[in-house]
Amino acid sequence: MFEKYLDISEEVKLALANNKAVVALESTIISHGMPYPKNVETALNVEKIVRDNGAIPATIAILNGRLKVGLSPEEIEFLGKAPNVQKTSRRDIPFIISKGLTGATTVASTMILAAMAGIKVFATGGIGGVHRGAETSFDISADLLELAQTDVAVVCAGAKSILDIALTLEYLETNGVPVVGYQTDELPAFYTSKSGFGVDYRVDTPKELAQALKTKWDLKLKGGMIVANPIPAAYEMDPNVINDAILEAVKQQNEQGVKGKESTPFLLAKVKELTGGDSLDSNIQLVYNNAKVGAQIAVELSKL
Ligand code: PSU
Ligand code: MN
């Protein structure tokens, strides 16, 4: 049934039909995560890195009401520039389609579209989670519930401390989502390689990770996995600088009463504003690193 809403690019279709490695990429990071033209440049570089590591990239979005898996460079450019691109999570998908709108997919909705197409590995920067103050705001990202039910592995740089990392880990544990450290025992915190929290399992090679994924899905243990890949040391930020910026961003959020789907974009934009260009450079580099590891995992998975 879903096929009638879905357009998979010829290249991605061919790769999937031949059991070649494919890596899904999200689009909220393009429309809401970075300024133009850096966003488009980064998205195209990410695709190149996926290719250089032996996999086919599939950037995912909703364009004029059509679910798209595998965007052309022109479509990426369009998404990076267009005003009124809607941040689209699970609940938004039917309305973005029925109204014929253009939507950038979050981690949750990118997982949904990737799974429809048959893609098992997805690389991005950061995921949504349980927000600070969630015990009263109930602000918990739909990304976490998606990880509990949709069979796609998400390679990310850990959780940003705009979130309550301890609560995020508890929530993932309850929902049976493994948090795996890629060549690390400690959960990375996006801009820095250390969060002060451990991971559930450490894995040192793409092959070992692919085997764990295959086993999980062979056993019909539905849901994804978080592959937490630390930012390369050369691009890490000073933890004090970033933590001060986050505290200030959360304070301004509370003062302004920002809630719902606006809360994460507000916090991300504030942190960026408060730290200047440094955080953007770090952000770009960690996404590149995740694209590389995501491609390597997809290649190993395609051999199993
Ligand atoms: N965290 C980041 N960068 C991002 C996002 C989160 O460090 O770009 C985006 C992702 O698309 C993620 C979404 O899926 O925000 C989560 O939004 P929410 O918390 O509203 O579910
Ligand atoms: Mn939220």
Image: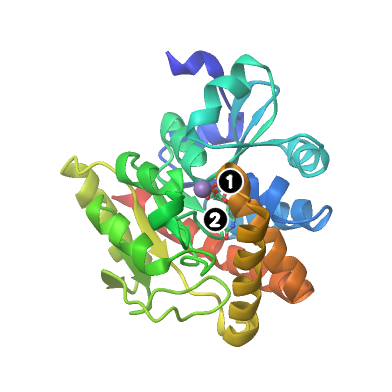
Can you name the residue that lies furthest to the left here? 219
Name above or below for residue 225 compared with residue 191: above
**In the rendering, at what x and y percent does residue 124 appear?**
54, 55
254 horizontally vs 33: left or right: left
The numbered disc on residue 124 is 2
**In the rendering, at what x and y percent does residue 257 appear?**
63, 52
Residue sitting nearer the eye, 244 or 28:
244
Instruction: For marks 2 and 1, give the CA distance.
Output: 7 Å
69 horizontally vs 198: left or right: right
Name the residue beneath numbered marker 1: 26
The numbered disc on residue 141 is none
Can the viewer see residue 178?
Answer: no
**At x 68% / y 18%, what residue is drawn?**
100
Disc 2 residue type (three-letter): Thr
Within 10 Å of disc 2 (Cα), the crowding (few <14, some 14-19, many 20+) is: many
**At x 74% / y 72%, what residue is drawn?**
274
Disc 1 residue type (three-letter): Glu
**At x 39% / y 49%, what residue is drawn?**
144
Quadrant location of the N terminus?
Answer: top left
Within 10 Å of disc 1 (Cα), the crowding (few <14, some 14-19, many 20+) is: many
Whether the residue under disc 2 has CB within 8 Å of ligand 1: yes
246 horizontally vs 200: left or right: right
Whether the residue under disc 1 has CB within 8 Å of ligand 1: yes
Label 2 residue SS: loop
Name above or below for residue 91 compared with residue 296: above
**In the rendering, at what x and y percent does residue 90 appear?**
48, 33
What is the quadrant of residue 255 in the picture? bottom right
Residue sitting nearer the eye, 46 or 12:
46
Residue sitting nearer the eye, 197 or 36:
197
**At x 73% / y 35%, what residue is drawn?**
85
Marks 2 and 1: CB-CB under 8 Å? yes
Counting residues from the N terminus, which is met first, the one under dot 2 or under dot 1? 1
